Image: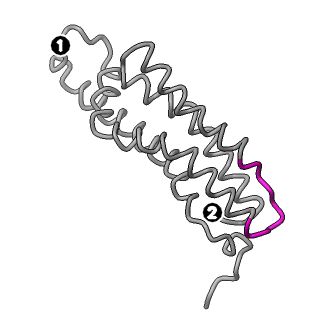
Amino acid sequence: MQRPKLSGDRVQSRWWYWIAAVPVVFVFWVVTVAWVAFAISLEPNILPSTYDSPIVHAALVSLVAVGIPFAVLIAVFPFAVFQDTQAIHRAEQGWKPPSGNYALTGLLGLAAAVVVWLLTSDISSAVIAGFVLSVPFALYYLRERHDNLGVP
């Protein structure tokens, strides 16, 4: 038995996968930070004396593993939003998300990452700043997409 076709199935775009990856990867990173912080708390003498908090150290260690995927997602995110909204416009489903405004809003995360990096020379803080601004908008966009198209 096949499921009924949803209106969003007629939109010929898979760019929303990139948009959905932003909060998914962020949650994965938060879980990784918690796990590494827990591991560090089991052996507190493992940290050099320069680190006060196992959570700060865990965040930095986990960014080594997922920093490049984070940076790629932050860079692709505004383009993915623009491409997905353009595909929705072409499909004429009734929902007309403002492509330019949404893409500019998606660009805020990348802009914040660049500004923080230039001001602090700390790539870890820059990536975190980019995600702090990108995740809420990605969740908002996916909710709106679901409410109007049924997909995702």
Judged by its main secondary structure, the magenta piece is loop
Whether the magenta-drawn stretch holds residue 97 is answered as yes
* Badge count: 2
- Picture quarter with the N terminus: bottom right
The span shown in magenta is 90-99
> Which residue in the structure is indicated by mark 2?
152
In the picture as drawn, the residue positioned furthest to the bottom comes out as 1
Closer to viewer: mark 1 or mark 2: 2
- Picture quarter with the C terminus: bottom right
Is residue 2 placed above or below 40 in the rendered structure?
below
Which dot marks residue 123? none
Q: Quadrant of residue 93?
A: bottom right
What residue is rendered at 76% in x and 58% in y?
147
> How many residues crowd mark 2 within 10 Å: few (<14), some (14–19), many (20+)?
some
Distance (Cα) linking label 1 and label 2: 45 Å
- Inspect the image, locate mark 1, and give the three-letter code of the amino acid beneath it: Pro
What residue is rendered at 71% in x and 49% in y?
99
Which dot marks residue 48? 1
What residue is rendered at 69% in x and 44% in y?
102
- Inspect the image, locate mark 2, and give the three-letter code of the amino acid beneath it: Pro
Is residue 89 placed above or below 66 in the rendered structure?
below
Residue 23, given in percent of the width and then of the height, sits at 52, 45
Residue 94, given in percent of the width and then of the height, sits at 84, 64
Residue 20, given in percent of the width and then of the height, sits at 54, 53
Element under disc 2 = loop
Q: Quick one: 42 or 75, which is closer to the camera?
A: 75
Image position of 79 (left or right of 125): right
Image position of 7 (left or right of 26): right
Residue 47, given in percent of the width and then of the height, sits at 19, 17
Q: Quick one: 48 or 78, which is closer to the camera?
A: 78
Element under disc 1 = loop
> How many residues crowd mark 1 within 10 Å: few (<14), some (14–19), many (20+)?
few
